[in-house]
Amino acid sequence: MSLLRDEHEIALNRIHVICEEAHDRYAEAAERVDAPALAALLHDLARRRDAAARLVRRHVRARGELPVDPDTDTETVHRAVEWVTLALASDEARALLDEREKQEADLTDALGQALRLEWPAAVRADLERLADEAAADRRRLAAARAQAASRGPSA
């Protein structure tokens, strides 16, 4: 294990942290919403981000490194700001979906940057699959937001 992380380890750890945080936020959001279909979508996305985090964690460990965990202090502040924002939103479901879409955009960006690097074939294939999944999940979130918008503000 090296004291300095190379660009590959930095890229993998960024993806890992985003997936860990996304898993937590999706799971929390699923418990917060009233609509069963939306809760099911959020639970599914939490499961998918957990699986992605585990996969990336294995790739980090295969490089002889330890995965970086999300900074709990920063995550706590982000959560507090998000929940206050949601509480003040006229339509909590749409605001929640907007926040999750932003996080998926961050994941897509991190995966795109990682894919600019040279990787062993197996790692590249996993990163490409995760990028495809993230793009599909962004479309699922956009569809859910559009559906929420067609129903009007939630009470």
Image (tube, rainbow, N blue to C red):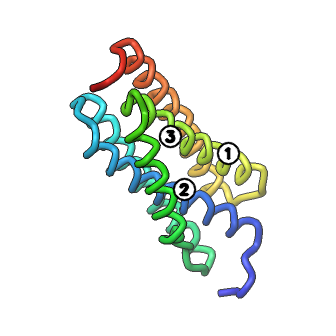
Residue where numbered disc 2 is placed: 18
Measured Cα–Cα span from mark 1 to mark 2: 11 Å
Q: Quadrant of residue 59?
A: bottom right
Label 3 crowding class (10 Å Cα cut-off): few <14, some 14-19, many 20+?
some
Residue lying farthest front? Answer: 88
Along the polypeptide, which appears first: circle 1 or circle 3? Answer: 3
Along the polypeptide, which appears first: circle 1 or circle 2? Answer: 2
Q: Residue at x 52, y 36 (%)?
A: 101
**Is 82 rendered above or below residue 21?**
above
Q: Residue at x 50, y 40 (%)?
A: 99
Compare residues 72 and 49 and report the one nearer the observer: 72
**Is 71 rendered above or below residue 102?**
below
Please give the label number shown on residue 99: 3
Residue where numbered disc 1 is placed: 109
Q: Amino acid at mark 3?
A: Glu
Q: Amino acid at mark 1?
A: Asp
Q: Is residue 84 left or right of residue 13?
A: left
Please give the label number shown on residue 62: none
Total marks placed: 3
Mark 1: which secondary structure? helix
Compare residues 16 and 100 and report the one nearer the observer: 100
